[in-house]
Amino acid sequence: DLETQYYFHEEHLGSARDQVLAERLRVLNPLVNITTEDTDECDVVVDVGDMRDSVKMNAECREKGQKYIKADCFGLFGYFFIDCLENHEYFEETKVEGDSGETTKQSFTASYSPLAQSVVAKPGLSNLQRLVRKFPPLVFISQALATHVGSDGMTAASVEELEVMVTKSLEGRGIPKGVIDKELLGRVKQSLDTEFVPSASVVGGTLAQEVLKIITHKDLPMNNWYVFDAIKCDGITCQL
């Protein structure tokens, strides 16, 4: 944590992370009421990192009626997955024609898939070029990482081990071979368990925007994957 979380220092070793982070954030903005609570009291649960069974956590959140987000950022890459349950209600504002400045609200309902269903979903495209245009290869790597239950991160994994893990996650999904190239796998492997602040800022800022949409029910939150590639300076949303 000391290497990747700039809010934590050596004197915080042994302390609860949520308590330390809340204290530091209160100093940054004392006008915001920041509290630490059990996840049972939350409307939205954001699961960060690869230290737990995210599929199980998502299922538990669904049982409690909680919206769930799985997110991680490693080096030049990052991703998040959003599950707002089957019936997420939201509204959009439309400006009325004229100079009155008035707006009208229109309500909608959107359905989201759980993580367990999304990571085995079939894209429905057998042509490699069409598949890559619609679904960036990084999203399939992110799916494999999101469902990997680690105890000490992925530092020890080689490119070959990462390739096996990703290939296994693609089995039975009708995804053509060659969608993941070794160059991308190598770059992701080099980035695992590292922190690149500009990438973390982009992914974290985008994620915060989506959390606000979920809480306020204003506008449609992303449905359901977002991946960021700092090499291409590209953030892409796709639904699986």
Image (cartoon, helix red, strand yellow):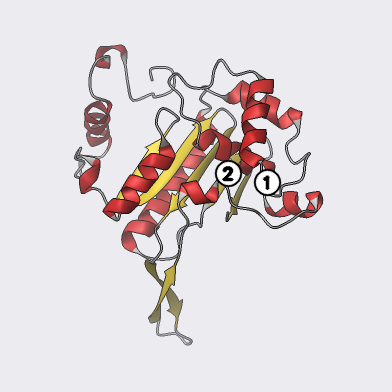
Quarter of the figure that contains the N terminus:
top left
Say which quarter of the image contains residue 96. bottom left
Residue 204 locus on image (x, y percent) = 45, 41
Q: Earlier in the sequence, mark 1 or mark 2?
A: 1
> Height in image: 29 above or below 88?
above
Residue drawn at (37%, 47%), measured in percent from left and top?
Answer: 59
Task: Write down the residue under mark 1.
Answer: 136
Residue 211 locus on image (x, y percent) = 38, 52
Q: Residue furthest top?
A: 10
Task: Write down the residue under mark 2.
Answer: 227
Could you tell me which secondary element the residue under label 1 belongs to?
loop
Residue 168 locus on image (x, y percent) = 64, 34
1 and 2 marks in contact (CB < 8 Å): yes
Spatial separation of the CA atoms under disc 1 and disc 2: 8 Å
Residue 133 appearing in the image: yes
Residue drawn at (25%, 40%), measured in percent from left and top?
Answer: 29
- Relative placement, left or right, of 207 versus 170 is left
> Height in image: 159 above or below 77?
above
Could you tell me which secondary element the residue under label 2 belongs to?
strand
Q: Amino acid at mark 2?
A: Val
Q: How many marks?
A: 2
Residue 32 appearing in the image: no
